[in-house]
Each structure stands twice: as structure tokens, then as C-alpha cells.
Amino acid sequence: TPRVFSGIQPSGNLTLGNYLGALKRFAEKQDEGVETIYCLVDLHAITVWQEPEALKRQTREAAAAFIASGVDPARSILFNQSQVSAHAEMAWLLNCVARIGWMYRMTQFKDKTQGKNAENSSLGLLAYPSLMAADILTYHATMVPVGEDQKQHLELTRDIAAKFNHDYGVDFFPAPEPLIEGTATRVMSLKDGSKKMSKSDPSDASRINLTDDADTIAKKFRKAVTDPAPLPESLEGLEGRAEARNLVNIYAALAGRTAADVIAEFGGQGWGVFKPALADLAVAKLEPISTEMARLMNDPAEIDRTLTQGAGKARAIAQPILEQALDIMGMVRG
Ligand code: AQP
């Protein structure tokens, strides 16, 4: 069976972008006859400063978001990265295969160090994609559902796999494919149609959090920045209207419809009609998730048990692959 691997950083409140670009797809993959492995990448999260107590809470909350979004720990392996040491060990091996220049070229690294002294960011932030390659390759996973922003990191993972295979003259790591599917693979900020919606954006109004209540969701959509023109009568009319396109795509993804279909229904209508309809739809889809998250968060010990069980299953797959990689590289295994 083909193996799917993907992860999310527990670096803050998960957003509607994480839900549509990742979580919703993760849950759907469970019905597609593949093995699914999902990881809360806490080792990735600490590439930028995390308050230790907040990181623990965010990790449990992210686990609750996965489960509430339909990722079933009985059907998928769900765990946090740091509980399976093979990830960090494999990352070291791959650090010695990947080139520094490859890391400097990553747009995420450039974005996250923009306006800051890059020399003063953590070494981990630069090596982030190498740990991500380790996450995927340690399972010989070939399918990686992600949002569009992760495409470049996936290409780098393929390059690292290919260089390892070439350097050691083996056919060991399969090349993973990014699965960038659906109508909302890049959900944009509600305040700036040129920026992606992100859990680390300083403006809370720029994003919908999975934990936002109905009133907050409605208010954020009402205040979302758009041009004043009504919705166009055809898809082509969305050209050059990033904010309008974003809201239409969000509607389509939440409703499970195409953007063309949404335009057919709302073309010619003003924002006074579309935004409340979008808010109602978002509340209808997200409220059950936030309610279930809150219920799960009442029992953090149960979440911890679920993650530890998942880690056990993950380790059983990862450890033998790590051992083989160590052997290929010439480490004495005793
Ligand atoms: N705006 C988005 N639209 C669609 N997909 C998105 N993803 C993130 N933002 C959007 C997808 O969610 C998964 C997890 O991402 P991550 O937490 O590992 O890191 P990220 O991509 O850097 O996401 P954020 O929310 O912007 O986090 P911060 O702000 O902490 O860096 C990935 O599959 C991603 O594509």
C-alpha cells in the first residue's frame, strides 16, 4: 500500500488555511486505500522561539484539531515528532547529504528572516527542510498532502533523496510526490490578498482560527479586505482580484463545490450578500470542529496517550529504515 505522510507545526492556533490545505485532505486520504501517517512536528516548531508550556498546550490542541477534523487515530498513525527519535537522527544524516546553498534558496527561510538579521536566526530554521525530508523519507512515504507553500520543500526532499541514492550507489529512498489538491491549496490572509493566511501572522484579524466562535468568524469575514466591486459573472472576472478570488475559493472549498459553481450562484451580488453567506457556511463547517476540540481538550491525558500510542506505531516503521540508512552510510551497527 502506498504510504502518505504529512505534518503540521504546533506553533500556534491552527487556521482555516491549515484546515483546507491540510487537515481536511488528511481526513479524506483515509478513505483512499493508502496508509496514512500524520505528525505534529514539534521539533520544527522550535526553530523559532516557543514558550515551553505554550508548546505543550499547542501540541495537544493541534492533536485535538486533527481528531476533530476527522483524522481517526485508529485508522491513521497520529503522533508528535519528538517522541520518535528516528526523525532527528535521520535529519542529521541528511544534513550531511544536503548542501547549505540549497537551504538558503528556500523561500520560507527568506520569508521568515525577512527584515531580520538572518545570521541571528536559529541554525534549525535554516535546516528546517532537511528535517522535513527526514520526516518523509524515514517512512519511505511517497505521497505528501500539503498546501502550495510547501511545494518547494518537497522538491528539495526529492533532491536530497536523489543525492543520497546517487552518493551511496543505492536505490534506497523513493522520491515523494506532493499532493496539492482541492480549491483552497493557498488560502490568503483576510487583510492582504498577497500574503498567505498564517498562524504566526501578528494580526489575528488576518486569519480564521479553528477555535474562533461564530461571532468572531462572522466579524472577521465582514471586515475582510476586498475591492468594492460586486462578484464577477464569470471566473475570468476574478483575474487581478486576489481578495475576491480568495473568498470565493474558501467558499468553494468549504461547500465542496467548484469556484465556477460559486460564481454561477453569486455572480453580480455585492459583498453585503456574499460575506454573510460565507460566514454562515464557515460557522456551519467549523463549529462542530471547535466544539469537538474543546471536548477533547478537557482530557489532555487522553490526548497524550493517543500520541504516545501513535509514536509506538510510527517507531516500528521508522526505526528499521533509519538502521538501514546508517548501515548504508557506513556506521558500525554491532
Ligand atoms: N494559507 C494556507 N493555505 C493552504 N494551506 C496552508 N498550510 C499552511 N497555511 C496554508 C498548510 O498547512 C500545513 C501545515 O503547515 P505548517 O504548520 O507546517 O507550516 P506553515 O506552512 O508555515 O503554516 P503556517 O500556518 O503559516 O504556520 P507558521 O505561521 O507557524 O509558519 C502545510 O501542509 C501547509 O502547506
Image: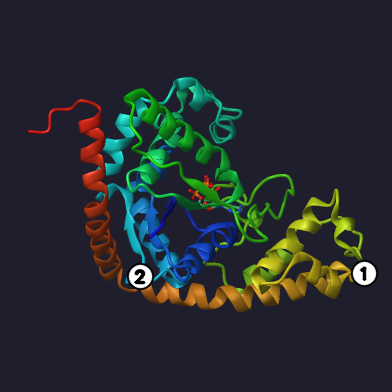
Q: Where in the figure is residue 130, as x and y percent of width and height? A: 41, 34
Residue type at tag 1: Gly
- Point 69% across, 71% down: residue: 218
Q: Are marks 2 and 1 in contact (CB under 8 Å)?
A: no
Tell me if residue 160 comes above or below residue 141 in the rendering: above
Q: Is residue 149 visible?
A: yes
Tell me if residue 284 comes above or below residue 315 in the rendering: below
Residue type at tag 2: Arg
Q: CA distance from mark 2 to mark 1?
A: 44 Å
Residue at the outermost left position:
334
Mark whose residue sits in front, 2 or 1: 2
On screen, residue 311 versus residue 185, left or right, reads left
Q: Where in the figure is residue 241, as x and y percent of width and height? A: 84, 52
- Quarter occupied by residue 213: bottom right
> Is the CB–ligand 1 distance for label 2 below 8 Å?
no
Q: Where in the figure is residue 142, as x and y percent of width and height? A: 44, 49
* Quadrant holding the N terminus: bottom left
* SS under mark 1: loop
Q: Earlier in the sequence, mark 2 or mark 1?
A: 2
On screen, residue 102 versus residue 315, left or right, reads right
* The one of 13 and 196 positioned closer to us in this rendering: 196
Please tell me the numbered disc located at residue 75: 2
- Point 78% across, 54% down: residue: 243
Q: Is residue 225 visible?
A: no
**Residue marked by disc 1:** 268
- Point 41% across, 29% down: residue: 122
- Point 38% across, 53% down: residue: 54
On screen, residue 72 versus residue 200, left or right, reads left
Q: Specify few, some or many for label 1: CA neighbours under 10 Å numbering under 14, 14-19, or 20 or more.
A: some
